[in-house]
Image (cartoon, rainbow, N blue to C red):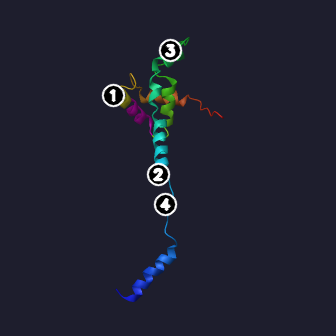
C-alpha cells in the first residue's frame, strides 16, 4: 500500500465525524412491537362471542347477526393492510385454530365494515 492511500483513509474518518453510538433501548422497543401485535389480534374478544351476539340480536327484526360487532371492528382495522378476501382467509384460519366458531365470507365483511361509522373517543 502506498503512503498516499493510507492518508486518504485517515481523511475519510475525519470526514464522517464521530463514531455513532447507539442509544436505543432495544428491550423496550421490542416490547412495544409485541404490544402492537396484541392490538392486532386481541384473543380475549372471542370469549364473549355468543353473549355479544345475543345482546346485538335482542329485539332485532329480520335476519339475526351472525358475527359480533367487536369481530367486525377488528376486521376493519385489519382491512388497512389486507383486502376483503384476505380477511376471509384470516377468519378461516381463526376458525381452524378454534378461536371462533365459524368464519364470515368477504361479502359479509364488506357489508358490515362499509356500514360502520368510525368513532374517535377523546380522553
Query: Looking at the image, is mark 1 or mark 4 nearer the viewer?
Result: 4
Query: Looking at the image, is mark 2 or mark 1 nearer the viewer?
Result: 2
Query: What's the residue at 53%, 16% (across, down)?
Result: 55
Residue 83 falls in image quadrant: top left
Residue matched to label 2 = 26
Mark 1 touching mark 3, by CB under 8 A? Answer: no
Instruction: Give me the C-alpha separation between circle 1 and circle 4.
Output: 43 Å
Q: How many labels does the image show?
A: 4
In the rendered image, the quadrant that contains the N terminus is bottom left
Residue matched to label 4 = 22
Instruction: Give the mark nearer the N terminus: 3 vs 2.
Output: 2
Q: Which label belongs to residue 54? A: 3
Instruction: Give me the C-alpha separation between circle 1 and circle 3.
Output: 24 Å
Residue 30 % position (x, y): 46, 47
Query: Looking at the image, is mark 3 or mark 2 nearer the viewer?
Result: 2
Disc 1, SS: helix
Q: Which of 68 and 123 is in front in this view?
A: 123
Mark 3 touching mark 4, by CB under 8 A? Answer: no
Query: What's the residue at 38%, 33% (across, down)?
Result: 89
Query: What's the residue at 44%, 25% (across, down)?
Result: 46
Magenta segment:
82-91
Amino acid at each position: 500500500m502506498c503512503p498516499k492511500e493510507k492518508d486518504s483513509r485517515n481523511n475519510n474518518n475525519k470526514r464522517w465525524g464521530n463514531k455513532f453510538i447507539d442509544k436505543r433501548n432495544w428491550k423496550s422497543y421490542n416490547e412495544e412491537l409485541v404490544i402492537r401485535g396484541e392490538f392486532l389480534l386481541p384473543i380475549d374478544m372471542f370469549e364473549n362471542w355468543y353473549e355479544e351476539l345475543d345482546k346485538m340480536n335482542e329485539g332485532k327484526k329480520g335476519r339475526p347477526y351472525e358475527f359480533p360487532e367487536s369481530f367486525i371492528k377488528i376486521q376493519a382495522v385489519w382491512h388497512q393492510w389486507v383486502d376483503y378476501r384476505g380477511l376471509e382467509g384470516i377468519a378461516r384460519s381463526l376458525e381452524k385454530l378454534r378461536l371462533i366458531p365459524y368464519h364470515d365470507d368477504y361479502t359479509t365483511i364488506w357489508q358490515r365494515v362499509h356500514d360502520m361509522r368510525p368513532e374517535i373517543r377523546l380522553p
